[in-house]
Structure formats: structure tokens, C-alpha cells
Image (cartoon, grey):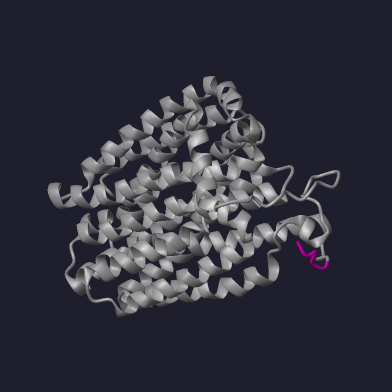
Amino acid sequence: MTIARKRPFGQNYAFVVAGVTFFVLLVSAAVRSSPGVLMLPLEEAFGWGRDTISLAAAIGIFLFGLSGPFAAALMDRIGLRRTLVSALLIMSASTAASLMMSEPWHLVLTWGVISGLATGSAATVLGATIVNRWFKTNRGLMMGLMSASTATGTLVFLPVLAALAQYGGWQPVVITVSIAAAVMAPIVYLLVPERPISIGQRRFGATEDEPLPQAPKGNFVVATLRTLLDAARTRTFWLLFGTFFICGFTTNGLVGTHLIAYCGDMGIPEVQAAGLLALMGIFDLLGTTFSGWLTDRFDPRKLLVVYYGIRGLSLFFLPYSGFSGWTLTIFAIFYGLDWIATVPPTLRLTNEAFGDRNGPMVFGWIVAGHQVGAAFAALFGGVMRQWQGDYALAFLIAGITGLIAAGMAISINSAKDETLKACPVAA
């Protein structure tokens, strides 16, 4: 590897890289959450049913998750910067191409297939890779901040996108997110080196030089699948995969995709409903960052029990809330506090079980489980709305799954030793 010139700030340059990554994740989250804003405008403009629009959203969410582990392997193979710049440019091009759509399959192709693959390469697994490469200490806190970028993406973009959709239709929404993705590509190229050693630095918190990891040889697709097969032999992997499946089902799959439409059914204007998501984003920014701090200090399994339990109870509450201003505020606070709070403890458990070398790739597969759950929930919510005429039953079922995940999280404790024995090369 060619050694680049030294950057300013010394070891603290890790925080520059983390800051750029934060904004990349923010833009990726905005692109991925845009179908929730576009649902009503597209329904009005094209006459497409919510089940049709939900299908495109579900495919995008599914591929968003499925591409994660392959993106992690690709970052090792061809480089993080090259992978990330390519993903941002594809993200921008695919969303811009949807301006010419006239048929449902155009929506599925642009916002589902292509956008899903691109955003998945600039998502949670990216945060895990950056934290592992650039930080020796404070990993939980930094992963909390990375995860909180999803909430901040909601906070910054959704009210703006909802206002654009309400007053200008769906096209301004598409143009805005396309430009945002394009702007980030040169910033990443200029400011994000491959690793600390590339600029003559150590990881933040490291007290001695570390050897440069050898780039993996062979086909990266085969390596990614082999990692999955090795991890899948362990009970810990399936417990983490299962709880994260439910995490996706109960967050961006159902709430992120359908809450604005649910509020619309209850007579709440789109901009006000987006403001509710923004309020949730504020509390998620606080909750997820605090969750990272807690993860550095307490048993992550117990944290997951609390997070999933609160989420399940919050989802039970919503259909009976009456959708008044103060009850929705209560929901936004309690649900928002742990929207993405599950990520730091889940990543810590993954790294403990599978090691720093394989951890990001295994975590990519666990995130894939998250997005499979989210994709199922996005489609499930649309189908339930068409069948039942409202979303109440869908949200109650999601509440039940949250409580199930809390019970599963308790069981992760007994699986740690077995995982470490099953994957000795990763430890």
C-alpha cells in the first residue's frame, strides 16, 4: 500500500474520518427513508396502491441489508474509499433516474434494486468498519454516534423532504437526496484514507504500532459466504440475527415506512407527521449516543433486554393513543430513545464473539437480518393496510415481536463461550 502524506491532528484524525462517515451515513439514511415521505405523493400522482409502493420500499430495504456483508468484504478487497465513492455516485444516479419513471417497475428498479444496493454499501456496516479500523478505545461511544447518524438523517431531512413533497410534489424530494449523495462523493475521496497507517498514524487509543492487516486473497464473494457459514454454526449468531431481524421489523420497516401514512389516515398533515419522526430523531440521537456510552461500561445483553422491552410497549401504546398531540409526543420520546440504541450493544457482542478481523463481516450479515425484517415489515404494513383498512393490527403485532426479542436477548449470555470455540481464527 502507498503511504499517503501525514494529515493534521495526529491520532485525532480518526475523529475527522468519523465525522465524514457520520454525514455519509446521514445521507444514506435520508435516501433510504425517503419512500416514507414519497408514499402519499406517489399514490396521488400515479394512482399506485400503497402495497405497490411498499413493495419497492421493501425490496430496497432488503437489498440494503443484503449488500452490507459483501460491501464489508469489498472494502477489504478494493479499498474503503473506492467502495464508498462508487456507492454514493450510484445512489445519486439511481434516485435521479427515478425522475423519468412512469410505471411501478421503474420505482422498483430505481428506489428498490439499485438504490437499495448502493445505500447498503454506505450504511451500518460502514460505521462498524470505520470504528474497528480507526479506534482502539471508546468503540461503543463511537458506534453510538455512527448509529445516531440515522436519527440525525431523519431529523435533518424528513421535515424538509415532507415540506417539499407537500408543496412541490415528489420530484423535489428526489432531486434533493440525489444532490446530497453526489456532494458527499468528493468529500469522501479527499478526506477518508484507507487506514491510520496509510497516513502514518495509529488507531485512536493505540499505544504502539500495529501491523497492516493483509488484504484477503481469493474471491470476496466466496470469502463473505464462508464467513456466514462459519458464523451460522453458532447459537450466538442466530440469537443476534433473530433479535436484529425484529429490530428491523419494528423500526425502519414498519415505523419508518408507514408512520407518516398512518398519521395521514388519522387526519394528521404530512409535515406534522414528519415532525413527529424528527422529534423521534432528536431523542434517538440522545438515546443511541448514550447507549454507546453504556455499552462501554455495562453488559450489552441486559441493555438489549431493556431496549426491546421499551420498544414493544411503545408500539402497543400507539394504536390506543388517540393520536392527540401529547400522546404522540409521549410515543415519540419513549420510542425514539431506543430506535437505533440496539446497534452499539449488538456490535460489541459480535466483536466479542467473532473478533475484530471477522467482526465487521459477521455484523454485516446480522445487519442483513435487520433489513430482511425491515423489508418484511414494509411489505407487511402495506398489505395489512390494504386488507384491514388501517395499521392498528400491524403495530400491535410489531409490539409482540419486540417483547419476544427482549426474551431472546437474555439467552445470548449462555452462547458466548460456545461462539468463541467455534470461531477460533476470528478471535
Q: Nearer the viewer, residue 120 or 159?
A: 120
Q: Is residue 397 above or below residue 160?
A: above
| Residue 12 percent location from the top left of the image | 78, 56
**Along the viewing direction, whichever of 122 and 295 lies nearer the viewer:** 122
Q: Residue furthest front?
A: 218
Residue depicted at 53% across the width and 55% down the height: 71
Horizontal side of residue 16 vs 58, given as left or right: right
Q: Position of residue 250 (x, y in %)?
A: 36, 43
In the picture as drawn, the residue positioned furthest to the top comes out as: 414
Residue, x 50% and y 51% (percent of image)?
221
Position of the C terminus, as image quadrant, is top right
Q: Which residues are magenta?
A: 1-5
- Name the outermost residue toward the right: 208
Residue 317 image offset from top left, x and y in percent:
31, 38
> Which residue corresponds to the image point at 61% horizontal and 66% vertical from the top-left?
82
- Answer whether residue 3 is magenta in the image: yes
Does residue 276 appear in the picture of this structure? yes
Instruction: Please state which of residues 158 and 23 is positioned toward the viewer in this rendering.
Output: 23
Q: Position of residue 212 (x, y in %)?
A: 76, 51
97 magenta-colored = no
Q: How many marks?
A: 0
Q: Main secondary structure of the magenta part?
A: loop
Residue 268, above or below 332: below
Q: Is residue 332 left or right of residue 289?
A: left
Query: In the rendered view, does 407 fall on the left or right side of 47?
Result: right
The N terminus sits in image quarter: bottom right
